[in-house]
């Protein structure tokens, strides 16, 4: 359990942390955003919030935490040019 990125949270069928007692977060199927990017993960109302993955049209990919519709917290960004940022 100490190596889990989910800090001991139960894992839902999707592989994401369980949202049962998480400020009413919910998981939605893949959503295509107005800029063409695709997001899969947790939502709080109509904002990305919790743990999720976004893939942009150019192939860049972010996997990690979201707060108030912005990538925020621990995550990994894979740039389309091959650079990787973890933080």
Image (cartoon, rainbow, N blue to C red):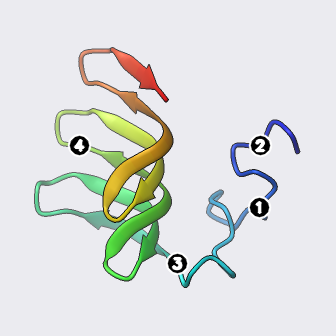
**Residue at the extreme right of the image, as rendered:** 1
Q: Which mark is residue 56?
A: 4
Percent x, y for residue 44? 43, 77
Percent x, y for residue 48? 37, 65
Q: CA distance from mark 3 to mark 2?
A: 20 Å
Which comes before the other along the chain, label 4 or label 2?
2
Which comes before the other along the chain, label 4 or label 3?
3
Percent x, y for residue 31? 31, 66
Residue at numbered disc 1:
9
Q: Which mark is residue 48?
A: none
Residue at numbered disc 3:
25
Q: Is residue 46 above or below residue 11?
A: below
What SS does tag 2 mark?
loop
Residue at numbered disc 2:
4
Mark 2 in CB contact with mark 1 (< 8 angstroms):
yes
State which quadrant residue 45 falls in: bottom left
Residue at image coords 74%, 62%: 11
């Amino acid at each position: 359990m100490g190596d889990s990125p989910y800090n001991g949270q139960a894992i839902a069928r999707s592989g994401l942390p369980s949202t049962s007692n998480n400020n009413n977060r919910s998981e939605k199927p893949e959503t295509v955003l107005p800029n063409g990017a695709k997001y899969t993960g947790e939502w709080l109302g109509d904002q990305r919030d919790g743990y999720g993955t976004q893939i942009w049209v150019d192939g860049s990919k972010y996997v990690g935490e979201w707060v108030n519709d912005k990538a925020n917290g621990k995550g990994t960004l894979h740039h389309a040019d091959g650079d990787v940022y973890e933080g």
